[in-house]
Amino acid sequence: MSRVAKLAVLSLAVGLAVILSLVAGKVWVPLWGLAVGDPRSVIMIDLRLPRALLALVIGAGLGLSGAALQGYTRNPLADPAILGISAMAALGAVCAIFLGFGASIHMVAACAMAGAGAAVLLLALLAGASASAVAFILAGTVLSSLAGALVALLITLSPNPFATSQIMTWLMGALTDRGWIELTIAGPLIVAGMALLLTQARALDVLTLGEPVARSLGLDLRRLQARLAVALALIVGGSVAVTGIVGFVGLIVPHLLRPWFGAQPSQLLVPSALGGALLVLAADSLVRLVPGAGELRLGVAMAIIGAPFFFSLLVRLRKDFA
């Protein structure tokens, strides 16, 4: 099967997943419920359509980020959260909730993006002038640990149980009750970050030859690192700003698609964006179908899927290097 045909299959699957997201839920609504004048159109247009589009954009961004980061680090275990941008964005949002601004989605989103921006600046400072992928990852690990500790501190010092509950619920990650406002906040940021990542496809291909060879071919590693950090801040920060933390998408999708499209980063970026959109759309539809009055949180569902996948990947890599 040609690459174009494979992309067409993925695109068709994403389209079907969007339709499933529109019709599935505690109450199933047929697709013609979108028709003007149909009383069910309120559910479809005001609730399910923006949620489906948000799942599509966030999934595409996280899938693309994972493929780009694995290409940059030449590490199959790399994930966007590894740079600490997710954790720092979450810290910013938790600060907003802690200070009593949890009712304002714009304030929470602004603080989350401020946290993501701070993560980029700190990454640049901690990674130093070497532009080494190893230094970059180690800096991200430091940031992630620091942000996690500060989030735990804020939860401990939370002024009332309502704020604590809101923080914990938000950290689980979900698309529940997200609408057009959240889409207009996160959508432009994620799309801008994706566009920036796609422009770095050739540079990531060169980097697969190794840093010394890439430098000898004229690749500016500091510029690549800076653009990658900014793009990830836009994508991950925009996602976390409106949904909380949804992990493992960037880890799972590139691995599933690499045997189909190849390991070369430029060949994997677009398929990973489509695969990420498909995964998040499907997962968000399934969490709505779990029996019970409420919904299973998307972040929890992705952790249930991602943790065994990560474990199996570690076992396989261990056998390969044994």
Image: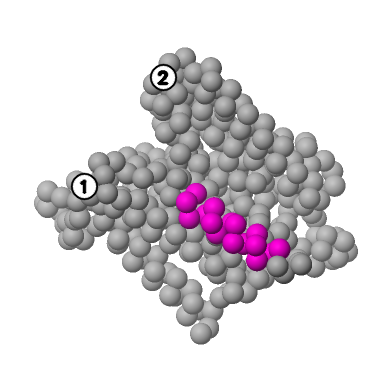
Q: Which mark is residue 196?
A: none
Quarter where residue 292 is shown: top left
Q: Is residue 306 magenta?
A: yes
> Seen in the image, is 92 located left or right of residue 118?
left
Q: Position of residue 18 (x, y in %)?
A: 34, 60
Left/right placement of residue 246 relative to residue 43 reads right
Residue at horizontal 48 percent and vertical 64 percent from the top: 274
User: CA–CA distance between discs 1 and 2?
Assistant: 32 Å
Q: Image point 41% across, 52% down: which residue?
A: 55
Which stretch is magenta?
Answer: 303-318
Disc number placed over residue 161 in the picture, else none: 2
Q: Do the residues bearing badges 1 and 2 touch, measured as CB atoms within 8 Å? A: no
Return the x and y of residue 284 as percentages of the image width and height: 37, 52
Q: Secondary structure at mark 1?
A: helix
Q: Is residue 240 above or below residue 277?
A: above
In which quadrant of the rendered view does residue 3 lie? bottom right
> Could you tell me the amino acid type at mark 1?
Ile
- Of 177 and 181, nearer the camera is 177
> Compared to 141, does 251 lie above or below?
below
Can the viewer see residue 52? no
| Dot in front, 1 or 2 | 2
The residue indicated by pointer 1 is 43
Colour mapping used in the image:
one colour
Q: Main secondary structure of the magenta part?
A: helix
